Amino acid sequence: MLRNKHSSAPAKATTRSKGEKGNHYLPLDTILVGDCIEQMNALPEASVDLVFADPPYFLQLEKGLTRPDQSHVDGVHDEWDKFSDFAHYDKFSRDWMAAAKRILKPNGAIWVIGSYHNIFRCGAVLQDLGFWMLNDVIWRKSNPMPNFRGTRFTNAHETLIWASRDQNSKPTFNYDALKQANDDTQMRSDWLFPICTGAERLKDDNDDKVHPTQKPESLLYRVLMATTKPGDVVLDPFFGTGTTGAVAKKLGRHFIGCEREETYINAALKRIASIKPLENIVLETVKGKRAEKRVAFGSLIEQGLIMPGAKLVDAKQKHEAIVRADGSLISGKHEGSIHKVGALVQDAAACNGWTYWHLKEGKNLTCIDEYRTQIREQMKKLSA
């Protein structure tokens, strides 16, 4: 049986031998030490809710970068970003993405972030493997690094791809919570965040960056708030210094990280140990109408809130309909559901019958959606 209860135990790092399978155990809140492909292939199938991946960019930097004053720019020169050619990089991408797809639940999803060097190649591989594209998101950096040579535009953004495991998946998307956080406006696909600097940037004893491409926690905060729920399992195959794990722990999600570099692992463990998870009541998100339990119009009749033969009218009392015993309406030559008849009498393509129709009792008009709300309140009490 998979371990799926929230654990308050500190994060840990563990090493598995090659080929070791974890068919009955999911190592929650753990950094798996070693190659991410081997580690993911050892995990149980369909066990992870979300994968967030920040893979090597294959920057192909042949020469060092310098500022106008000839000082050195601390770029990415690590071995993990070096590949022999595009074919080598593409095979690596196919292998880790295939491993990630295997461990995703049927309604799971993946985020991949990259720069112009690699994101288009990653997108092609995602589609080739049968992932279903949902959005590309532009992370616009409020404080990007300048183009010191003056030969190109300032590279002021990175691209994130959000894709579900396949076309039939129904991944988590907290639409109403995002809209609420965005001053009651739909969240757009261009996000403005600063790059990781200041106290958040992890430094070693020599005051050098521990990791050259550490992502800001604000970026992961939005990703996880948007596309996961408390208790979900988030896997990061390129864990680095643990930004995904730190934010996941703070937001009451579980994490699994894969990482090879001991320096990164040690920094991540120390970082995550300092994180205090938020209380459950704080993690509750706004839920819109789509999250409410379905109530059929016929239920209002069955429970005696609206009687057969009752007269329904629109708010301006321009149209009226009679309620029949089976929950259908009749209005002149039109008959059918509250939605169908509402659309027909207005000669409209569609209608929300719950907000259109009102029960007329004498001079009083009551929107029938108020009666649906009463039933939903009763259902909440029964499930409490």
Image (spheres, rainbow, N blue to C red):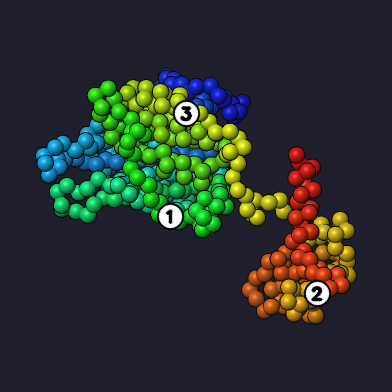
Q: Which residue is mark 1?
A: 189
- Ranked by sequence position, the earlier of labels 1 and 2 is 1
Q: Position of residue 373 (x, y in %)?
A: 75, 55
User: The residue tagged with tag 1: helix, strand or loop?
Assistant: loop
Could you tell whether 315 is left or right of 101 in the image? right
> In the image shown, does 227 or 81 lie closer to the viewer?
227
Work out whether 274 lies above or below 112. above
Residue wearing tag 3: 275
- Say above or below: 149 vs 325: above
Label 3, label 2: how far apart the Cα atoms are: 59 Å
Q: Select label 1 or label 3 by which is in front.
A: 3
Q: CA distance from mark 1 to mark 2?
A: 43 Å
Labels 3 and 2: the sequence-earlier one = 3
Pointer 1 with pointer 2, Cβ within 8 A: no
Give me the residue at 47% from left, 45% from top. Answer: 222
Give the percent coordinates (x, y) of residue 67: 15, 42
The 10 Å Cα crowd at callout 1, few under 14, some 14 to 19, many 20 or more, is few
Residue 44's tag is: none
- Give the image location of residue 244, x and y in percent: 43, 35
Q: Which quarter of the image is occupied by the C terminus? A: top right
Of marks 1 and 3, which one's residue comes earlier in the chain?
1
The residue tagged with tag 2: helix, strand or loop?
A: strand
Q: Quadrant of the N terminus?
A: top right
Q: Residue at x 86, y 70 (%)?
A: 361
Query: Which residue does the numbered mark 2 point to in the structure image?
Result: 321
Callout 3 secondary element: loop
Compute the Cα span from label 1 to label 3.
29 Å
Q: Is residue 313 left or right of residue 286?
A: right
- Determine contact: label 1, label 3, CB under 8 Å: no
Graded by Cα atoms within 10 Å as few (under 14), some (14 to 19) or many (20 or more), the crowding at tag 3 reads some
Q: Nearer the viewer, residue 30 or 276?
A: 276
